């Protein structure tokens, strides 16, 4: 469905100097600054997949989306969406895609929402019957009719986002690009948007590419994620595999009455491993002992046994590393692998 | 053709509706722009009064009155500044929103311009025009303008409109390279009002300079239809000025296409 082959994007702009003197200097200097926003990225996405495209601020997510939608032309490499090169055959490509940029709207600001939809109907050449069907479905999942007659500029952010998603889906596109579709939304609206995306994907086998900073979006929607950092692809695979590869730590919290029994004791010694594989933290107020360890080297029962050999344990909680933690670690460049 | 019409008609209709929604600012604009026509009217009347010649630059005093007000009528339906919309779209980043839809950006702008043109034609133009004809017959004692001249004038004005918006589209492309286009818009307006004959009829210029004007698109924007209205062109000359307009429409269409291709290739969309 979508093939991205060795795509790079370099932004070149004139160097700017600070202050008034700088502005004058800028007039005469020909110095350029270049920024490689996307660096030799390749991937392939199949029909019906929902792919999470994640990375820290400025990683190059939006730039990639813009190239896949045909708004930007890659400096090198090429994209093929449904057999069409988006930047060369922009209009043909546009017929097949739906796009939501969470930060801005594609609707006509001054017009009632209903008018925007009427215009889109003409632009995408949608038959009356298909339009009716689409609208019924979209209204069901996004509840558009409750604000259909209001000018877009009077809509709340959540309403606008639902409207934008509806507008992107009206012509039943084969591919849906969502650049931060849940930015600034409350929990209920976020949930509705996610459900809508899921339903569309299931009903029409729509391919979805989604960038987000909300981990829950990814956990609930994406079967596959692509992580980019500094313009480079650093991970591409399933969510489970990401957790497996990067989430090597496991945490066990135990409630213990005689916490002082652990003072001065190195649990790693008790377990016979090096200290970097197992660390402990005492919480005197809650009477808990937290043991964080490498799940590839140590098993949970081993750890619990070691603790119980020192004192009685009243309650046990076992936690996987959260996805958020993993992602944070990746963004901060301090992952083990 | 039919399909194209269906796609772009909403753009024109929207603009029409939008214009109607901002009536107040529009009437203010109307009064101010008519005001400047009256200034130039009194100025020219003083000039004609102070000379013994019957005609200046080939125009009699009465023809000058018609010239001044027909310039007003023509420019309000021709000079629709789509480059301002382009710069607005660039600054707001909404060009991207146009590019993700299967529409032609230039066509959507021109359709919006058509909506504006229809509105401006209905509201100030036709009123001033009728007023002028009434004034001609009752005060100046002239005949009504001949129907054939009116038809030719309208035909020529439509081409003027196309020449203007196609030119202005090319001009608006500057917005993609410098975010500050406002100053240039002022310069453009000043230049056009001079080169298109809005301020002074082009026939007032020396021969040599008029030859240069012949090779620029600006005279085809306002001067040509107004002179046709005045019946200043006959026979082969008439055919020449009309064909020159057609040529400009074609040339500027192609030029805009080329520039747009270049621009989209190195287009930088801000934000996100
Ligand atoms: N027009 C431009 N000119 C110069 N540099 C740019 C331009 N657009 C983007 N960049 C740079 O390219 C890099 C990638 O930007 P991009 O918008 O793709 O990031 P992103 O991953 O979407 O980030 P965010 O999560 O903050 O939206 C950034 O460093 C940005 O500053
Ligand atoms: Mg972004």
Image (tube, rainbow, N blue to C red):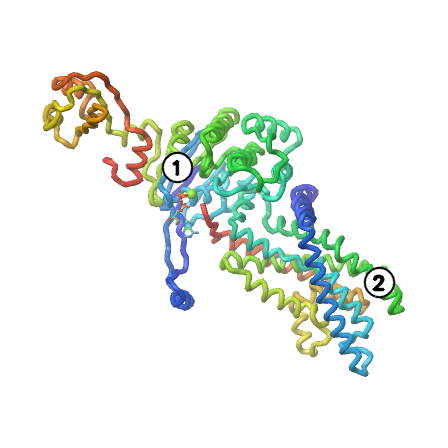
Position of the C terminus of chain B, as image quadrant, is top left
Q: Measured along the vertical axis of the image, is residue A113 above or below residue B18?
A: above
Is residue A308 or residue B257 the one in the foreground? A308
- Answer whether labels 2 and 1 touch (C-beta < 8 Å): no
- Residue B18 in view of the camera: yes
Is residue A41 or residue B109 the one in the foreground? B109
Q: Quadrant of residue A7?
A: top left
Q: Is residue B221 left or right of residue A296?
A: right
Q: Residues within 10 Å of mark 1 (few under 14, many from 20)?
A: some
Is residue B176 or residue A83 the one in the foreground? B176
Q: Residues within 10 Å of mark 2 (few under 14, many from 20)?
A: some
Q: Quadrant of ligand 2?
A: top left
Q: Is residue A248 left or right of residue A27?
A: left
Q: Secondary structure at mark 1?
A: loop
What separation in Å lies between label 2 and label 1 (alpha carbons)? 66 Å
Q: Secondary structure at mark 2?
A: helix
- Looking at mark 1, is its residue's CB closer than 8 Å to ligand 1? yes
Q: Is residue B264 left or right of residue B23?
A: left
Q: Chain of mark 1?
A: A
Q: Chain of mark 2?
A: B
Residue located at (54% from left, 29% from top): A142
Query: Are dots 2 and 1 on a single chain?
Result: no
Position of the N terminus of chain B, as image quadrant, is top right
Q: Position of residue A130 (x, y in %)?
A: 63, 29
Say the numbered circle drawn on residue A213.
Answer: 1
Say the numbered circle drawn on residue B133.
Answer: 2
Q: Measured along the vertical axis of the image, is residue A72 above or below residue B152?
A: above
Q: Measured along the vertical axis of the image, is residue A174 above or below residue B206?
A: above
């Amino acid at each position: 469905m979508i093939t991205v082959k060795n795509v790079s994007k370099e932004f070149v702009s004139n160097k700017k100097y600070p202050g008034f003197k700088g502005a004058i200097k800028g007039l005469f200097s020909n110095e350029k600054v270049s920024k490689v926003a996307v660096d030799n990225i390749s991937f392939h996405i199949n029909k019906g997949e929902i792919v999470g495209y994640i990375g820290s601020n400025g990683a190059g997510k939006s730039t990639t989306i813009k190239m896949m939608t045909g708004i930007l032309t890659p400096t090198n490499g090429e994209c093929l969406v449904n057999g069409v090169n988006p930047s060369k055959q922009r209009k043909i490509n546009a017929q097949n895609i739906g796009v939501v940029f969470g930060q801005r709207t594609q609707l006509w600001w001054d017009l009632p929402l209903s008018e925007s939809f009427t215009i889109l109907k003409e632009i995408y050449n949608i038959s009356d019957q298909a339009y009716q069907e689409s609208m019924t479905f979209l209204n069901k999942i996004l509840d558009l009719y409750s604000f259909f007659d209001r000018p877009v500029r009077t809509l709340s952010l959540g309403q606008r986002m639902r409207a934008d998603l509806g507008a992107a889906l009206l012509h039943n596109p084969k591919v849906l690009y969502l650049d931060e579709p849940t930015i600034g939304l409350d929990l209920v609206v976020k949930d509705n948007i996610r459900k809508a995306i899921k339903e569309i994907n299931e009903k029409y086998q729509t391919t979805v590419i989604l960038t987000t900073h909300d981990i829950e979006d990814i956990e609930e929607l994406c079967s596959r994620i692509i992580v980019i950092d500094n313009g480079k692809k650093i991970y591409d695979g399933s969510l489970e595999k990401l957790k497996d590869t990067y989430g090597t730590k496991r945490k066990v919290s135990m409630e213990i009455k005689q916490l002082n029994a652990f003072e001065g004791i190195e649990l790693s010694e008790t377990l016979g491993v090096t200290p970097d594989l197992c660390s402990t933290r005492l919480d005197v107020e809650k009477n808990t002992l937290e043991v964080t360890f490498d799940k590839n080297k140590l098993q949970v029962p081993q750890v619990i046994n070691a603790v119980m050999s020192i004192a009685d344990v009243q309650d046990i909680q076992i936690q996987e590393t959260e996805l958020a933690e993993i992602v944070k670690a990746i963004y901060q460049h301090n992952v083990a692998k | 053709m039919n399909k194209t019409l269906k796609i772009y008609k909403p753009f024109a209709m929207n603009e029409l509706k939008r214009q109607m929604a901002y009536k107040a600012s529009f009437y203010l604009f109307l009064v101010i722009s008519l005001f400047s026509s009256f200034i130039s009217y009194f100025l020219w009347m003083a000039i004609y009064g102070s000379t013994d010649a019957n005609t200046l630059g080939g125009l009699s005093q009465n023809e000058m009155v018609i010239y001044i007000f027909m310039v007003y009528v023509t420019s309000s339906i021709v000079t629709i500044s789509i480059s301002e919309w382009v710069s607005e779209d660039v600054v707001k980043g909404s060009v991207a929103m146009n590019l993700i839809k299967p529409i032609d950006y230039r066509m959507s702008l021109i359709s919006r311009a058509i909506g504006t043109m229809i509105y401006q034609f209905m509201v100030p133009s036709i009123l001033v025009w009728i007023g002028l004809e009434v004034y001609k017959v009752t005060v100046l004692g002239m005949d009504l303008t001949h129907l054939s001249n009116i038809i030719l004038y309208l035909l020529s004005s439509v081409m003027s409109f196309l020449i203007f918006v196609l030119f202005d589209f090319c001009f608006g492309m500057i917005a993609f390279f410098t975010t500050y286009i406002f100053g240039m818009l002022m310069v453009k307006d000043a230049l056009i009002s001079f080169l298109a004959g809005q301020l002074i009829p082009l026939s007032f210029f020396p021969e040599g300079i008029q030859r240069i004007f012949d090779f620029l698109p600006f005279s085809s924007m306002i001067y040509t239809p107004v002179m046709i209205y005045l019946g200043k062109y006959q026979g082969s000359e008439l055919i020449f000025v009309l064909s020159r307009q057609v040529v400009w429409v074609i040339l500027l269409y192609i030029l805009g296409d080329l520039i747009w291709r270049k621009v989209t290739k190195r287009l930088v969309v801000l934000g996100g």
